[in-house]
Amino acid sequence: MKVNVETDFHPRLTDWHLRKVLQWINPLDLAGIEYIRLLRGEDAGPNETGQATYLRSPVCVGEYSNPNLKLKNPKAPYITIYTRPFYYGIPWLFRYSPVATLRMAFVLAHEVGHHLIARKGYIFAANETYKPYGMDDEREEGTANRYAVDLVRRMSARWYYRIGHWLSNKISDWYYNFGQAAWEKGEYDEAAYNWFSSHCANPENHDAALAYKRALAKINTRPKSNKRLERTRR
């Protein structure tokens, strides 16, 4: 599989995690994908409106593009992974661990799942039905997540990745508890950041996802005059 490294944020490290994961994906599932490219993506800090990334939902980490289906263009499909948001929720030292490799497994496999649906119409069973390519489809997102979770679980059967899976859950729980403490103090921006990071660390932590949405709702409904300046996260 051709990999185009076009990022300046952990380029070699991210490429290493990506190639480790490619060894676990069935080559037949990758058939038709021309290349995978690594781009930087947006930073965690405030944008031109002063709003931090963790308050701008959803955050795009990976993206599947199929010009054949959208533009009737003969160009082959490809996958993009944005390296800056990819590392959200992973403490610095753990970026060099199986924690990040398993994150890559989930992100890449999810996009491969979209490719399978675009290529043959389904992932697991031929009777699966989805909206046309380019339309928001919660069912397709859910099935692609199942494909990604299956890969993470297969990898976690190995002791090395089992440790990474355990650490990912612990990091997620750690962020979640900090978010709960911030929420009880009325620090809703801090709660949103920690719950956002908790869900990034473990996409299967649905409690974190729900709590994050709750914090966003609280932030978006409070008077603008009471909003404090969100801190830049690095």
Image (cartoon, grey):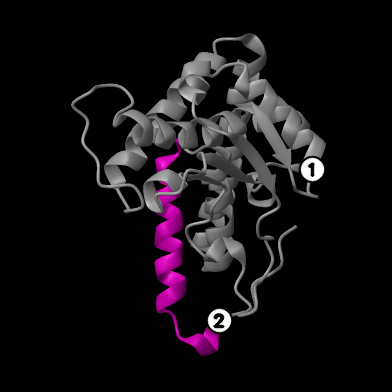
Task: Tell me the magenta residue range.
Answer: 204-227
Q: Look at label 2 and name its amino acid.
A: Lys
Give coordinates of residue 219: x percent, y percent. 47, 72
Q: Secondary structure at mark 1?
A: loop
> What residue is pinned by disc 2?
227
Q: CA distance from mark 2 to mark 1?
A: 33 Å
Q: Is residue 229 left or right of residue 60?
A: right
Going 66% across and 71% down the picture, which residue do you hit?
A: 46
Viewer-side residue, 36 vs 159: 36
Frontmost residue, 98 versus 125: 125
Where does the N terminus fall, quadrant-wise? top right
Q: Earlier in the sequence, mark 2 or mark 1?
A: 1
Q: In the rendered image, which residue does mark 1 sit on? A: 10
- State whether residue 194 is above or below residue 224: above
Three-letter amino acid code at the position of disc 1 = His
Q: How would you rate the neighbour count of disc 2 (Cα within 10 Å): few for under 14, some for 14-19, many for 20 or more?
A: few
In x, y percent, where is residue 127? 18, 26
Quarter of the C terminus within the rendering: bottom right
